[in-house]
Amino acid sequence: MMAGPAAALGVRLRVLAESESASAAQVVPEAPVGRAADESALRALVAEPSPAAVLTFEHEHVPGAVLDALAAEGVSVQPGAAALVHAQDKIVMREHLSGLGVPVPRWAALASEAELENFLAEVGGRAVVKTSRGGYDGKGVRVVASPADVADWFAAAREGGPALLAEELVGFSRELAVLAARSPSGEVRTWPVVESRQVEGVCYLVTAPAPELDAATEHAAREIAVQIAEGLGVTGVLAVEMFEVPGVGVLVNELAMRPHNSGHWTIDGAVTSQFEQHLRAVLDLPLGDTSARAPWTVMANVLGSARAEITEALAEVTQRDPGAKVHLYGKDVRPGRKLGHVTVSGTDLDEVRARAEAAAAIVRGDEGGPIYWGENHG
Amino acid sequence: MMAGPAAALGVRLRVLAESESASAAQVVPEAPVGRAADESALRALVAEPSPAAVLTFEHEHVPGAVLDALAAEGVSVQPGAAALVHAQDKIVMREHLSGLGVPVPRWAALASEAELENFLAEVGGRAVVKTSRGGYDGKGVRVVASPADVADWFAAAREGGPALLAEELVGFSRELAVLAARSPSGEVRTWPVVESRQVEGVCYLVTAPAPELDAATEHAAREIAVQIAEGLGVTGVLAVEMFEVPGVGVLVNELAMRPHNSGHWTIDGAVTSQFEQHLRAVLDLPLGDTSARAPWTVMANVLGSARAEITEALAEVTQRDPGAKVHLYGKDVRPGRKLGHVTVSGTDLDEVRARAEAAAAIVRGDEGGPIYWGENHG
């Protein structure tokens, strides 16, 4: 999704692709195949056929040591390893955010089952346990009532697997997300705060702006994103996922340091998309206007499909709703997999949301059925 | 500019590129180098490595005989040679439009100097003479008072060069353009009518919608575009350039059968861009909503630049105007060359236009200077 904006800006992309058929390799001419954790592959990527101006990411699975090594050789790595670690390791992130005074749920690193027992006693018997690394889209997250519920994770941690942390179960009314972009020279811009609806830890619907959000909370949420971007030295796009808690305000849940699903609405719905802005930010260009183009924009994810070939859905979606913007990712269909999204903008929120959900249902091939039904939503 | 929409629709592009450094080859992975007039290059393009669903164009310089040969072999050529000839040969176009009853300027094919003398006498002493083929952006167009003014063109025509036609000098108040898209199964959609300002036959500013256009003329202009699309069997995007003549209405000036400069505003300013729509149309997918996203959108072309490297302008444009959308084409700078464009949307037309012109001036590297000053504007 960065390819279109890069072309318009006159920025040449070179992508390290997982495979020759990867989504990015389908649309970027220079796409050598390699693993993001492979230092020599990354070194070749930034060096050949000519030195790249900057190295950036569309996921966080790049070892910090590799990035530090490249940075030491003079490569501009954006965001740098020191910032990126906060999107890779939830314990480091929670520690740093607590240190900055950013509101987060009550939490504790868990060195042992006993520490989890203590935490459970403190918070009333139930808590969320997470692996500090490797989790995403609901993976690596469990609600537990006893250490026995995560015995396997404790065992893995003792074998060198990811450390664990516990968090209180927050009584939130909904989830919000704030997208920010920061450039190395320090310019920061945030987009309007959005509401993110999730099923099994996977985002399926984003509404921009978040409906009925009071001005004070909107302001506080955007300020928190700025504070985190500056406090952690983030460059490029930062997504801050938050809980809205009645009577309390917002608590920060997760961070991502890259264009994020909660910001896909910006492609059609904002003057500057998160993908254009990420390029601008990592290249230290001035940042573009983040205003919404329409009163309401709703983005619905397509998570899995009953169709063997989802491009078949294009005709039906447009026949039913010529204003629905369909984005397909060029991926093979698998249960629960993010295959694409649909965006609708307009002036009537109920109508816009209904249209986005209906269009996504068509691409999923299950009109009127459940929003999300995958085998693989652990 | 088709690469971004193609990626979103899950459509794989394969492009016959003029050279390895051509704009399209910079952004499309499958871009063999070859000439569009080379039948074997086109045959390989549509066949390898797998048969293409459709063959379409971003310019009209493909011989009809080549397209007919491919079509006879079962290739879906959109638009077909029988339609495309009207964008290639102005005499064929004028004849067919006159036959359809579409309003056009008074005109005559010129088999000899004597016929031009007669035409000049009929229309009051001065007329426009055009070459029937090969002209674009003001090239192949001259205002003449006598056959001597185009003696070279008559000589060339006798040597097998393009035939000539004469047209009356129309007393128009401004130029309008209507963009339409038509699919093989017959669906047609038009975008709002735009005003196109030209210098030396080259478009430099497009305002969408055309300001102060009365509803009857708007309706008539869109109906003419539909009539032409249907009458000529156009598939894909059709651009109809028109003169608005006070007291008369509109007269059709030129046609293009491809995404056109007068439609670049749709990338940022319409729900469906001309590039997405062209893909939809030639693939016979239902067409998208052509509504404007904002009350006013102005697109300013960048024609030549005093800068050696225009990407340098990105920072300055955005610093001055974070809402200006800059589109660069990855071309080397040459005088008068279309290097990119800038689009601004908003609610106040004067402000929007001033912002677009100021942003384009920055990219041109000549703030406050003339809109267009090239050596090569024949």
Image (spheres, coloured by chain):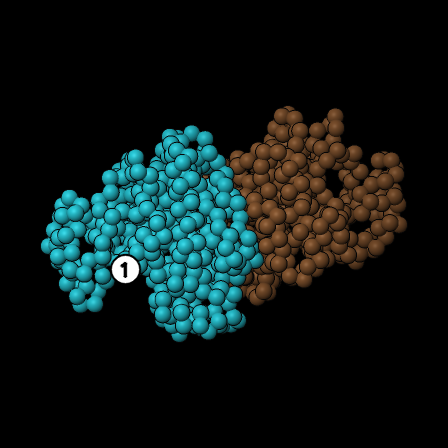
Chain colours: A brown, B cyan
Which one is nearer the viewer's eye here, A4 or A66?
A4
Question: Looking at the image, which residue is at 61% across and 37% down?
Answer: A208
Q: Position of residue A89 (x, y in %)?
A: 69, 48
Foreground pick, B277 / A199: B277
In percent of width and height, residue B140 lies at 23, 55
Q: Please state if B243 lies on the left or on the right of A233 as rendered.
A: left
Q: Amino acid at mark 1?
A: Arg
Please name the residue shown 21% across and 65% down the image.
B161
Can you say whether A83 is above or below B295 in the image? below
Label 1 resides on the chain identified as: B
Mark 1: secondary structure: loop
* Disc 1 target residue: B133
Front residue of A133/B56: it is B56
Residue B145 position, x and y percent, is 13, 48
Q: Residue at x 42, y 63 (%)?
A: B80
Position of residue B363 in the picture relative to residue A365 (left or right) = left
**Nearest the eye: B121 or A256:** B121
**Residue A233 quadrant:** top right
